[in-house]
């Protein structure tokens, strides 16, 4: 789909590139972890990779339209891999990744400068939209006070 090509790194894929594929969760399955839909909201760029003794920290630069949904300790999917955000600043965020995740995904082949698909947290997106699309007809403290509650 044109939407996919325009909003993902897929236009840059070459024959032999590694992708992360996972079957969708069945509605009857137990939910364990983050809610990932498989939609790509946009693209980020890896700007630093720091190798520690027990984890690898990837720092990603992205635009404000995605970063507004990124919160520390929240979830994000990078190339379809559900991860926890370990740090956020004004223009970037970090994820700390355990060695098993590196071994079992395409993150092992990623390097500084590479682009990566980003899916932000769906619950965060809904909350953001709800809070930012409120109008004067919403029920809030002032409305309730004015109506005698």
Image: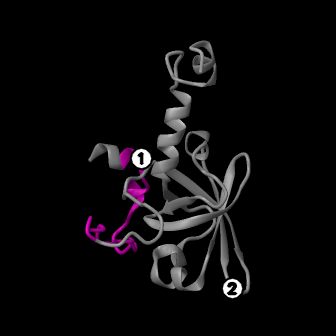
Q: x and y percent of residue 50 in the render?
A: 72, 74
Is residue 12 depicted above or below 16 in this figure? above
| Residue at 60 percent of width and 70 percent of height | 111
SS of the residue under disc 1: helix
Look at the numbered discs 1 and 2 and tell me whether their residues touch, using CB distance below 8 Å.
no
SS of the residue under disc 2: loop
**Lower sequence index among marks 1 and 2:** 1
Q: x and y percent of residue 80 in the render?
A: 43, 65
The tag on residue 7 is 1
Q: x and y percent of residue 63 in the render?
A: 60, 43
Which one is nearer the viewer's eye here, 53 or 131? 131
Q: Which residue is mark 2?
A: 54
Q: x and y percent of residue 76 in the render?
A: 53, 59
Q: Residue furthest top?
A: 146
Q: Neighbour class for label 1 at 10 Å: few (<14), some, many (≥20)?
A: some
The magenta stretch spans residue 62: no
């Amino acid at each position: 789909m044109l939407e996919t090509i325009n909003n993902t790194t897929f236009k840059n894929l070459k024959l032999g590139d590694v992708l992360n594929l996972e079957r969708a969760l069945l509605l009857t399955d137990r939910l364990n972890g983050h809610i990932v839909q498989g939609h790509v909201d946009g693209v980020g760029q890896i700007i630093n990779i720091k190798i520690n003794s027990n984890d690898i920290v990837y720092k990603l630069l992205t635009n404000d339209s995605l970063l507004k949904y990124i919160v520390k300790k929240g979830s994000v999917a990078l190339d379809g891999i559900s991860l926890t955000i370990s740090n956020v600043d004004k223009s970037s965020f970090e994820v700390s990744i355990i060695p098993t995740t590196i071994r079992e995904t395409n993150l092992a082949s990623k390097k500084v400068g590479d682009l990566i698909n980003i899916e932000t947290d769906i619950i965060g997106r809904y909350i953001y939209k709800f809070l930012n699309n409120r109008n004067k007809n919403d029920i809030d403290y002032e409305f309730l006070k004015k109506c005698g509650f």
